[in-house]
Amino acid sequence: MDDLLVVDEVVKRYGNYTALNNVSINVPQGTIFGLLGPNGAGKTTLIRIINQITMPDEGSVILGGEKLQQKHIKDIGYLPEERGLYKSMKVGEQALYLAQLKGLSKAKAKEQLKYWFDKFEIGDWWNKKIQELSKGMAQKIQFIVTVLHQPKLLIFDEPFSGFDPINANLIKDEILKLRDQGATVIFSTHRMESVEELCDHIALINKSNKILDGKLIDIKREFRTNTYEVGLITDRKAEVTQNLKEHFELTEANFKTINDELKFNVKVSSNESANQLISHLTSQGQLTHFVEIIPSVNDIFIQTVKNN
Amino acid sequence: MNHLKLITEREFLNKVKNKTFIIMTFVSPLIMVGIFALVAYLTQLNNDKVRTISVLDESNLFANEFENTEHTKYHILTNVTLDDAKKIVQESNNYGLLYIPKGHTVDELSDKIIFFSEESPSLIVMDKIENRIEEKARNIKLKESGLDPEVINKLKVNISASLETFSGEKTSKIGGGLKLIFGGAAGYLLFMFIIIYGNMIMRSVIEEKTSRIIEVIISSVKPIQLLLGKIFGTSLAGISQFLVWVVIGGILLTVLSTFFGIDVAGSQMANGQIPANQLPNNEVALVVQEMWNLPIANLIIMFILFFIGGYLLYSSLYAAIGAAVDNETDTQQFMMPIVMPLVLAIYVGFFTVIENPHGTVSQVFSFIPFTSPVVMLMRIPFGVPLWQQILSVVILFGTFYLFVIFAAKIYRVGILMYGKKPTYKELYKWLKY
């Protein structure tokens, strides 16, 4: 799988402040790439560099094998976090204008707009002014305008903010569909559950540096702690607990059950296997619950940023 | 380039379709002409009142001198005492009472004449009365000295020097005023245009910032294209509005002056110009000829060049300010440096250029790019060497080029900056980003 976008050792300084310090990321073709980081980490600066809004001081950006240049503007669709539309302009006119700025011909833009307006069932908005629409409605228009010119690379910065759950789902499905049709998506958000759900790859930026990146599944493997949630029914609670403590590292567990049982998080050391734990547990009582704790993106985020 | 066209078109249409803009375009000339007509009407009304002035002439020297005019009637009192006369005048609600006491010689009277009135009398009225008395007194003294006033009047010589340039063109003194009107109007028009439409550009930039559409736009086009598109689009809208104003205003004025008999030319002349009917006929012909002799082609071409150059220069600054702030109230601190040179140019134009169109100060200010559009436009009707005009235009457009780069830098950084109001120091830092 080729990388559509390669950001190589990019440095960006504003006066004495370094906004990006030697940041490199590779975004593979046809994937959804989560760009994560705390507020002010430098995500927006990186996104703006990819959009050629600002130029990097050092380093290079390669898109589809070529150095990023003016002509690539039509290959990128960008939905910024701080977004809006001309309030007093009609929806249709405005969408046409923005599409033409992205290089579509007027006829082509109209055809595409009709397709999307029909799809979202908002054909009757065409002659309304933006100020007559609700925030969520305006967000829909912005989404359409972002994807209208069928760009190879889509950049969404907090795409779900302002949407109700139904519309957020609608947009999520469209993003997945676009990916399946071959588009590559960079997705920046603070909503970790949507990262879990959507992203194939992630990169974490903190204080102007990239501190983590890779395939989400690989990262999760890397962060696994070999800890299992355990539920065990036994009459000899104190004795069993004592016995387990001698062999394993126990911490308090916090999952819901319907039985009155012992609940632990059990950490297995690297030279033991889960099977050994299970056989030990079954010898002590009736095992009702056994799940590996997979680190959430949320945990990985917090842990990595704290340690940084 | 295609982007520039798209942006210019959008900016233009957006301005022109705006309801307020449409209303202003068509209503403003109506209001202006309406006010003009109102002022003309009120002035007439003011003059329509007939004043009656009673005259009590105990010396019997001047009573016959006061002839009734359209707006002033004289009522000669005889065989009454001063106290009675005062009562009569007050009761009949006359404008005032002129009292000339008994005296043997004219000299004796000179500081004894009194004008009684309820309120302070109009200076013009007093002037007329004093002139009458002075003329009569002079004639009396001439007679006393044994001279005939008729003879004296015949001896008067009236000198009026004709003006002619070395190349043989006849000019008139009125022509100087004409040049002043042409130059002044051009300079003032540009001044107003910059302030009105510069502000419009600024607001349009702020609107894009506050509606947060800017980041979407800027990911599609270069900031400089957006900046230029804005300036061009707004300028086109402005020029269209101006043309509509001129046409509607012209038509209305013509209609008004024809139907209501308001003498437009006359009322303009009253503001300090010599009324046309007092000029000898050949002088009027000269003025007309003078108008055609003005370097009209030169004037129009330079008007267009300086107008565009000056407007573009200032509007790039307005756009930069719009980009630097979040809302209109924050613009105040940055407006000063823009408005100051403009006001200076107007003052230099109206005082220095009138005094001496080719003096050092006038010349210097007609080359400084921030004042040159206004000052040079005022100088041109008086004849400025072509090389000076060209040099000034070149400097102007060169500066515009530099400032567009400068403005684009501030613009590029500013449009994506939200939050606190920047200081000049920060603006300087932005230039280096």
Image (tube, rainbow, N blue to C red):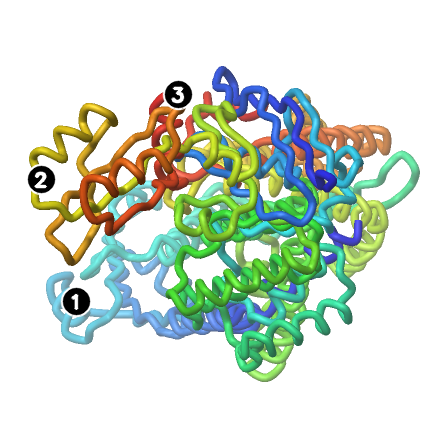
Q: Quadrant of residue B116?
A: bottom left
> Which residue carries the number 3 mark?
A308
Q: Quadrant of residue A283?
A: top left
> Which residue carries the number 2 mark?
A237
The amino acid at mark 2 is Lys
Asked if labels 2 and 3 share a chain, the reply is yes
Q: Tell me residue B174's x, y (percent).
A: 70, 49
Viewer can see residue B178 = no
Q: Residues within 10 Å of mark 2 (few under 14, many from 20)?
A: some
> Which residue carries the number 1 mark?
B85
Secondary structure of the residue carrying tag 2 is: helix
As drawn, the residue found furthest toward the top would be A16
As drawn, the residue found furthest toward the front would be A283
CA gap, disc 2 and disc 1: 131 Å
Q: Tell me residue B138's x, y (percent).
A: 46, 46
CA gap, disc 2 and disc 3: 40 Å
Point out the frontmost of discs 2 and 3: 2
A67 lies left or right of B431: right
B197 lies left or right of B5: left
The amino acid at mark 3 is Asn
Q: Residues within 10 Å of mark 3 (few under 14, many from 20)?
A: few
